[in-house]
Amino acid sequence: MLGLGLIGGSLLRAATAAGRTAWGYNRSSEAVDAARAEGFDAGTDLAAALARAAATDALIVVAVPMPAVEAILGAVAEHAAGCPLTDVVSVKAPVLAAVRRHELGARYVGGHPMAGTAESGWSASFAELFENAVWVVGAEDDSDPQVWAAVAGLALECGAVVVPAEAGEHDDAAARISHLPHLLAEALAIAGATGGDLALSLAAGSFRDGTRVAGTAPELVRAMCEANADALLAALDETLEVLNAARLQLAEQRSTVDLVSVGYTARRRYEGTGRTEITGIAPGAPGWVQQLREAGRAGGVLRSL
Amino acid sequence: MLGLGLIGGSLLRAATAAGRTAWGYNRSSEAVDAARAEGFDAGTDLAAALARAAATDALIVVAVPMPAVEAILGAVAEHAAGCPLTDVVSVKAPVLAAVRRHELGARYVGGHPMAGTAESGWSASFAELFENAVWVVGAEDDSDPQVWAAVAGLALECGAVVVPAEAGEHDDAAARISHLPHLLAEALAIAGATGGDLALSLAAGSFRDGTRVAGTAPELVRAMCEANADALLAALDETLEVLNAARLQLAEQRSTVDLVSVGYTARRRYEGTGRTEITGIAPGAPGWVQQLREAGRAGGVLRSL
């Protein structure tokens, strides 16, 4: 585990608890000291951690924030270029591009556990973070089936369900259901506060729920949204079109019929979403990547390999 | 009570429970039959209900949806023009304008109990609906202090706290904290569903909470939003400006800093909003309306008269 923050730390705990031999690297000694004090195998020597991975062909997990990914990949390319490689960064296409720039693509399969808390750092980490969470595992045309199975296996052992998705499709989906909600919540909070104390004293459930995630630490919201800037921009533009059309209908016809009827149908569809189980697709079989992607697009999840 | 739906029905129950002599009118006999079966005083004869009000100088409460207000006010003007008059419609400036058109302004003080459920009709009504709810009571320059005290007294007896506000200020505030949240929730639901089953299967808390009220029955959302079209249009335009600025910063600087930092501050302000009690302002004393409005603007509530 390269990085022992909330996700990397929780992953070191969960993998160890699942009986794996796992060790962690972190740049700052604070997290390393705390992990060691709890009996975990951790250090601040990146080259040493990678040399050990290279010697055992261990699965390397990049668990640092997006701005630190480039430097970590440089070290991986130098010390452990042949190892199977994954990551847990919340955006997938930019990581894939960076991996390819470092010529590490052959044994890379990206990942994104959709799990987190408002807290961060090793001190917030816990082994159960991934239980029943969705863990997206990257399904690219050139994905290595053995590495794919290794990454999906890690996710399943940590208690997650696996959703296969191509990097760009993941980023588009995440923009819609995770990053755009944050931008709209911020905008709604601003609209309420601009109304002053009177408006805030009248606010009830719709405002409270609609602005909840605007209470998340600004640096976390920014890191998440800005790392996925391209996909978020596309989703935001689409939503601005929807809202502009609604504005026009409200101004010209004093009606909200189009927005409200389509929005209601959309929410009902979401409420009715059930997870079907993906079965019978073996990584490496003919057409396996395309089949997994199709199944993921249809809302399916893998619960075992 | 003219109208025995969720609000009017609950008000008939609550006023009766508080020891008042109260009777209700409803156009359809279904609600009337149900109310009578429970022992309430109700009928389908509007002229008779109003003649009784005129004979006793009773406080008339208009509790019909906005589209039916005009006809009800016509009957009030015909049969009980001298009675103190209020309403519980969710928008205030259009009702005030209609009241003035019918020359009923002298003894009218508007009201809006900020209470409701997803259900509607007499069968959904209950006496405790208003407990600890905010009940906006209209404070206009020409408000009659006796009627004002009567309307505020009814709200307090029903268990609500009273927020004094001028009609236009109420509508602006309601647009920001109640109607705009619905439009944004609908737009977010659409953005998620457009992402297909993959996006919906990845959706977690931010999407669930941000779209919750898009599950409200479309006709209720439309009635609420469209009745407040003018104020909602202003709030929507303001929010479109905020989102367009955010879009520009995201596209040009790949940053969300302005939106996220201002939004976070706004949500924190909302979380820190406490209700101060308004005391020492007697309806009728010099400057009372202006003082009550100022206190309401500052987030104050009346808990007694």
Image: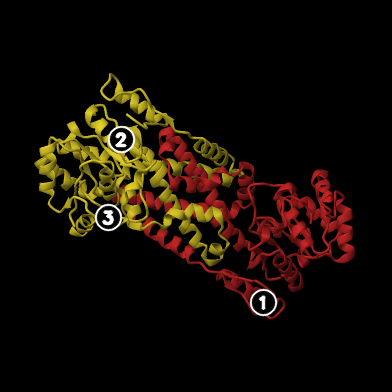
Chain colours: A red, B yellow
What is the chain identity of the residue bearing mark 1? Answer: A
Q: Can residue A233 be seen in this view?
A: no
Residue B137's label in the rendered image is: 2
Quadrant placement of the C terminus of chain A: bottom right
Q: Please give left or right for residue B75 compared with residue A34 in the image.
A: left
Q: Is any part of residue B275 visible from this angle?
A: yes
- Image position, residue A94 (x, y; %): 68, 56
* Disc 1 from disc 2: Cα separation: 65 Å
- Asked if B156 appears above or below A142 in the picture, the reply is above
Indicate the amino acid at tag 3. Answer: Trp
Would you say A215 lies left or right of A40 here? left
Say which element carries label 2. strand
Q: Name the residue under label 3.
A: B122
x, y percent for residue B185:
45, 52
Q: Which is closer to the viewer, label 3 or label 2?
A: 3
* Both labels 1 and 3 in a single chain: no
Pointer 1 local density, CA inside 10 Å: few below 14, some 14–19, many at least 20: some
Which residue is label 1 attached to? A288
